[in-house]
Image (tube, coloured by chain):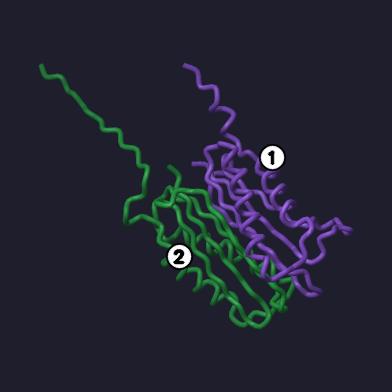
Amino acid sequence: MSKKVTQSNKTYQIRPSFKDKFRPAEAKEKIEKILREKLKNAQYSSSELPQWTREIADQTKSELKALGKDKRYKYLVQVIIGHNSGQGVRVGSRCFWDEDTDDCTYVTYMNDSIFCLVVAFAVYLY
Amino acid sequence: MEDQGNEEDISFPSEDVERCVQDSVEQVLATAQWDEKMVPQWINDICEKAMKQLTELGRPYKFVVTCMLMQKTQQSGAQTVLSCSWENQTDGYYQIIYPPQRAKDSAQKTIQCIATVFCVRF
C-alpha cells in the first residue's frame, strides 16, 4: 500500500513580476492620447467643465486597468482642469509608499483658455 | 492567542486623516498672501507636515498627498475630479478646500488651496 503524500509550497506574491510592473512611460503615452482627443481646441465653459473632467478621469482609470499590469495594483487618478487666465497655479505631491513597486506619472495640457493636469498613481497591494 | 489590534484597523481612519491635513494647511496658509516665489515652499511645507503626521498614526496605510495652490483672481476657476480603483472598505481619500467655500470673511483672500490625501491599505 502506498500512501499518497502531497507537498504544497505556499507562495505569497509580495512583488509584481518584472513584466507586470507598472511602467510610468506607457501610462503617460495613453494619458496624453486621451487628453489630445478630449481637449483639442477646447474652450473654457463652466457648465461643460465638470463633465469633461469626469470623463477624462474615468477614461484614464479604464486605460490604466487595461494596460494589463499585475492585478494587485490599485490606481488613483486625479484630474484638475482650470481656466487659463494668467493666474498662478502650482501642484505638488508627496507619496509614502514602496519605491520598488509603486509609481506615478503626470501629464499636463495647456491651450489659450484652459490648463489640464492629470496625475495617475499606481499602488501595489501585498 | 488573541488578535486584539486587528479589528480596529480595518476601517479607513477618516477623522485622523482629516485632522492631519487640516492642521498642516491652516498652519502654512493662515496668514499668507500670494507670492510666486514662496509657493513651492508652501507646497513642500504642507505636504511634508501632513505626511509626517499621517505616518505617525502608525496605520498599515500608504499615503499620497497632493496639494494645489491657485491664485484667486476674478476669473480663476478650476475643477478637480478623482477616479480610483481600490477597495471601498479599507481605502479612502480626504479632500480639503481652503478657505472653505462658505467663509466669506476669511482672511485668506488671495490663495485657493485644494489638498487631497489618498489612503491605500497594504
Q: Position of residue B49 (x, y in %)?
A: 63, 49
> Disc 1 residue type?
Glu
Does A68 appear above or below A72? Answer: below
Q: CA distance from mark 2 to mark 1?
A: 33 Å
Q: Nearer the viewer, residue A102 or A70?
A: A102
**For the residue carrying disc 2, how many other residues have a C-alpha within 10 Å: few (<14), some (14-19), or many (20+)?**
some
Q: Locate residue B81 relative to residue A20 in the image: left or right.
A: right
Chain painted in green in the figure: A
Q: Locate residue A76 relative to residue A67 in the image: left or right.
A: right
| Residue A55 in which image quadrant | bottom right
Q: Report which residue position mark 2 lands on.
A: A27
> Disc 2 residue type?
Ala
Q: Position of residue B63 (x, y in %)?
A: 56, 48
Q: Nearer the viewer, residue B61 or A45?
A: B61
Q: Secondary structure at mark 1?
A: helix
Chain painted in purple in the figure: B
Does B91 appear above or below A94? Answer: above
Which label was assigned to residue B15?
Answer: 1
